[in-house]
Image (tube, helix red, strand yellow):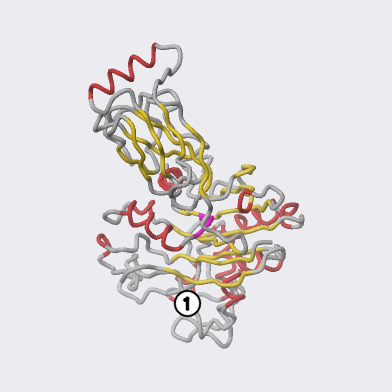
Amino acid sequence: MHFLIPFSSLLAGLGALVSAAPNPTGALSLAQGKDPFTFDYTAPSANAKNWIGIYHITGGGPDQEKQVDPSLTWKYAPAQKGSIKIDVPFGGGKFKAYFLANDGYTWIANPIEISAPTISDGKQFKVLSWNLWHGGTKINGYHEKQIKFIKDQAVDVVGLQEATGDHAQRLANALGWNYHQNNGQNTAGIISRFPITKRHANLGARTAGVELAINSDKTKPFNFWSLHTTAYPYGPYEFCFESKTSAQVDQAEISSGRVSEIKAVIDGTKAQRESNAAFILVGDFNSPSHLDWTAANKHCDGKVGAYAWPVTKYATEQGGLTDTFRKIHPDPKATPGETWSPIVKTNSEAGSAGKKEPQDRIDFIFANAKLSAVDSQVKVVGMPSENYVNNEWTSDHASVITTFKTP
């Protein structure tokens, strides 16, 4: 990324504002017969601080000779005439290259459009559901750690929760991806290597939905939703700490708002789910799964057996969706897949402080029958600690990653 803007460049930028249009005299081209992202350039004179920056073609570049967003990747081009190789932005796609003067944003040459191959072989794609936990801001160095995790996992689409503010945009800009979060107060967001072809209206205050084109192929659209349901009252606490009956927990689930929230999304996407397009719903549901709480897999230290958690039950039975993790790992006792919580092991809330925190799978990736999951994993990195500020892992939830066959 490039942020340095010396005073001389600011003066040049002011001059550009009053000019009719950029009028560069240099040249920039993609070098032929050389490594990808190698550029031939010519400037009016040598300058150690001239530089070439790469931006996403969808925007963010200095089209008006002033900074909009940070560059995705960049390198100095100090000679009057030369060639340089710049790192290809993660994930591939379409980009715009700018040859800029003296650590600033005045054009030396007209920008050029360039493409880089995607990292996907086209046969599969990967989806990540990730509760960022206050955007990740509780962890030192959270931005770099989040970007590294996304890159290392080579995912294509990410459904975010606890992304309130500009966190979806922040991550997308750093990756050169597309993003959707139509309200900065909305906890749910989406970032995607694939183009966003449509932005859906929210189906509740804690949702985000888009239509995407798989591998930029508009003949293969799919609808993707991120949902973050309300947290309290939290069902496992009702069972494990307060010893409530199933009927009482039924009422608590309704009063929490989670049941109406899942109904709004499932009912509101009926046409999408039943169309010929693929459909994916991810999120932090703040509810365990009815597929996990079974007679053979008791919870609350063996005190509670089967319970039909209404949120996941509605998604699968009324929504016709498949829980991809449990599809790949059908035995909840052998592979519990707990996502809450890698760092919270002892409860600290009033009335239950000091008690063992219930560990549950409350983060999900659901898909309709148009998609076939080939792998699904619960993921963290490092060794998450309750003393979390220097954790490599930046959340209090584990993430979920599912790999799908491309339809």
Q: Quadrant of the C terminus?
A: bottom right
Q: Amino acid at mark 1?
A: Ser
Please provide percent x and percent y for residue 37: 44, 45
Q: Which residues are magenta?
A: 155-159
Q: Which residue is mark 1?
A: 243
Rendered residue at 30%/55% (across/down): 138
Q: Is 51 placed above or below 197 here?
A: above
Q: Quadrant of the N terminus?
A: top left
The secondary structure making up most of the magenta span is strand
Q: In front: 50, or 247?
A: 50
Q: In front: 36, or 157?
A: 36
Direction front: furthest residue: 33
Task: Indicate the quadrant where residue 104 lies.
Answer: top left
Q: Is 272 placed above or below 351 here?
A: above
Please provide percent x and percent y for residue 355: 34, 75
Q: In front: 30, or 357?
A: 30
